[in-house]
Structure formats: structure tokens, C-alpha cells
Image (cartoon, rainbow, N blue to C red):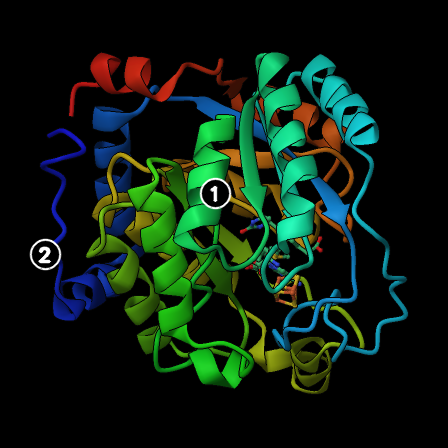
Amino acid sequence: MTAATARTDWTREEIAALFDLPFSDLMFEAQTVHRACHPRNEVQLSTLLSIKTGGCVEDCGYCNQSVHAETGLKAEKLMDVRAVLQSAAQAKDAGSGRFCMGAAWRSPKARDMPAIVEMVKGVRAMGLETCMTLGMLTAEQSQQLAEAGLDYYNHNIDTSPENYANVITTRSFEDRIETLENVRAAGINVCCGGIVGMGETREDRIGFLHVLATMPHPESVPINALVPVKGTALGDMLADTPLAKIDEIEFVRTVAVARIVMPQSMVRLSAGRESMSEACQALCFMAGANSIFTGDRLLTTPNAGDNADAALFAKLGVNAMQVAPQSVREESLCC
Ligand code: SAM
Ligand code: DTB
Ligand code: SF4
């Protein structure tokens, strides 16, 4: 199987049937697919940096950077290019292979683009893979980023099309798809996933993975567990109804199904690891997750931290994946 021949004709029924498998059968299938397509016991390390924090006009119910949330987070302006490059150098020293820069924007303004382009060029010159997540992009902005050498663009669909309006009202699911198409057309690798544990149903998790599995598969698929932040719509809702929180086994099932339906994608165990048991994270790696965010902070919320990760990797016999350009990776894989 090559990227071009990976199945994109999954039906919702087929995906539902995977979710319904006995847990151990699902894990066996996910591990089988994983070993056929990826080096085993290797996990890619990425580092996140919030280059523009807070004050975002969008109303994403999970996000503490929205002006609609009452979290007391101070809005900051776009970071200096030099400070961003310093941070990237530290991430590289700590063993990270990819540097992901996130901005709390609905979409970047024309005046922001020159600094953004400098950041991409500078981080790339250090030998790190570059990723950005800046909100919605036009075709022209995508082209500008591609010309700067951006390797990946992160833009999540977050949940199923049916559940989208329960989470975000200031943009539509179709807006998200349009940006993904612009990014793809510009030749940038796509990083697209979502959040589990927002009170959605299993049918929503099926619908969410179905959309990803029936588009040209994103090269990276982040699966975030909601980090419930007090003052956000979803953080407060879940504080009132603790039973709405995602069950760990259901979370692992979601990772396993993502691995099976998108065999070649890097499945990233993203936000939420800080409050996840080591056993749950180990099950996620067994289910096919092969990428994590390192460091003690995600964008604005705490992350597991390098010491905890090193200890977990040692216990599990997992190694940090060495970064290879996408083309080399594709040639070296057998599926
Ligand atoms: N503003 C840009 C956007 O929305 O595309 C980029 C930044 S945004 C913080 C990137 C992604 O982080 C979101 O799409 C969402 O999936 C994830 N995220 C944000 N807050 C989260 C939370 N509290 N828990 C889990 N994931 C979260
Ligand atoms: C993604 O899917 N998860 C990362 C990355 N893409 C940008 C962000 C998680 C953010 C969690 C909340 C925060 O730290 O602000
Ligand atoms: Fe803004 Fe992104 Fe947060 Fe939504 S997720 S409020 S777009 S920063």
C-alpha cells in the first residue's frame, strides 16, 4: 500500500464495526497495521510554542484563548521572530524533531505574514520540521507558507460535522474543509484531527474519523483528549457533569480505529496526556499512536513534561523517532 492506494472509501458502518470489536481484537488489528506501516517502538517528538496567545474572536467551546471564555488568560501580541527562533533552538537541543507554532487567530492578517514567513524559514534552517496552526487560510496565504518552506499545517476538524455547531458557532465545518483544501493544493502536508471527550457520542467519534479517512489522509492526525479549562463552555459543562468525561478505554479505541483507517498517518497522542495514566498512554502507543508533544507546556496548558516522558519511554522500551523527510519515510515503508 502507498499513500496513493490507502483506502479512502471507508463507510460509517465499517468504522462503527471497528469500534464495536472486542477490545483485544481491535488492539491486535491496530498493532498489525501499525507494524506493517511504521517502525515499531518509535515515537516522534514535536514541540509546541504559542506564538500569539489569547484574544481570539472565535467561540470554540473548549478553548481558553477565546474572548468568549472567562479564564483570565492574558492576550499577548505576536512574538518576536528572534524569540521564536531561540525557543526552537531549545526544542532541538531537547531532542525534538518538529517545531509547531500556534496562533490564537481566526485567520492571519496580511500584516502578520512577513514575520510568519521569517519564522518558518528560520526554524527550517535549524534542521527542524516546521508546523504552523494559524486558523483559516486563503489559497494565497497557503501558497506563501508553502514558498517559505512550511512542512505541515495543523487545522483540526475537531468533531463530526453534525456535532460541530454544538462546539463552535463562529465558523462552519465547511470553512475548515476549505482551508484544508487550500493547504493541500499548495503542497503542504496536512495535520488534521480533533478532540475526544467533549461530551460527544460514539456516533460523533465515528463521523469525525469517517471524514478524515475519506479525504486524502492527513499526514498527521492529532487525537486530543479535552483539557477541561474552567471558564470555557466545555470545561464548565464537564465540571458539572463529570460522567461526560471520556472513558480511557473509549479513548484508546478511538486511537486504534484512527490507526486502522489511516494506516500511514502519524497518529499523535496530543493534548490531555498530563492527566492520563501511564497505562492509558501505553495502550495508546500499542493502538498505534506514534507521535507526542513534549515539554511541560502545550500551547497554554500543562503537558506531561520531558522527565515524565523519558521515564515512560524507558519503562516501555520506546525510542524517539529520528526525523526523516517525508519522501525518505515513504520509500522506506513496506505498506
Ligand atoms: N487558532 C487555530 C485553530 O483553531 O486552528 C490554532 C490553535 S488551536 C489552539 C489548535 C487546536 O488545539 C484546536 O483545533 C483544538 O483541536 C486543540 N485544542 C485547543 N484547546 C484544547 C483543549 N482545551 N483541549 C484539547 N484540545 C484543545
Ligand atoms: C492539536 O491538535 N493539539 C495541539 C496542536 N494541535 C496545536 C494544541 C493543543 C492545545 C491544548 C490547549 C492549550 O494548551 O492551549
Ligand atoms: Fe481561536 Fe483556535 Fe482557540 Fe478556536 S481553537 S478560539 S480558533 S485559538
In the image, 203: left or right of 215?
right
Mark 1 lies on a secondary structure that is strand
Q: Which mark is residue 67?
A: none
Name the residue carrying label 2: 9
Amino acid of disc 2:
Asp
Along the viewing direction, whichever of 318 and 258 lies nearer the viewer: 258
Amino acid of disc 1:
Tyr
Q: Position of residue 243 (x, y in %)?
A: 59, 80
* Residue 138 shows up from this direction: yes
Q: Position of residue 42 (x, y in %)?
A: 45, 21
Q: Nearer the viewer, mark 2 or mark 1?
A: 1
Q: Earlier in the sequence, mark 2 or mark 1?
A: 2
* Residue at 70 percent of width and 37 percent of height: 115
* Residue at 73 percent of width and 82 percent of height: 236
* Residue at 13 percent of width and 63 percent of height: 14
Q: Picture quarter containing residue 4?
A: top left
Q: Quadrant of the C terminus?
A: top left
In the image, 207: left or right of 322?
left
Mark 2 lies on a secondary structure that is loop
Q: Is mark 1 within 8 Å of ligand 1?
A: no
Name the residue carrying label 1: 153
Q: Quadrant of the N terminus?
A: top left
Is 83 situated above or below 179? above
In the image, 144: left or right of 315?
left
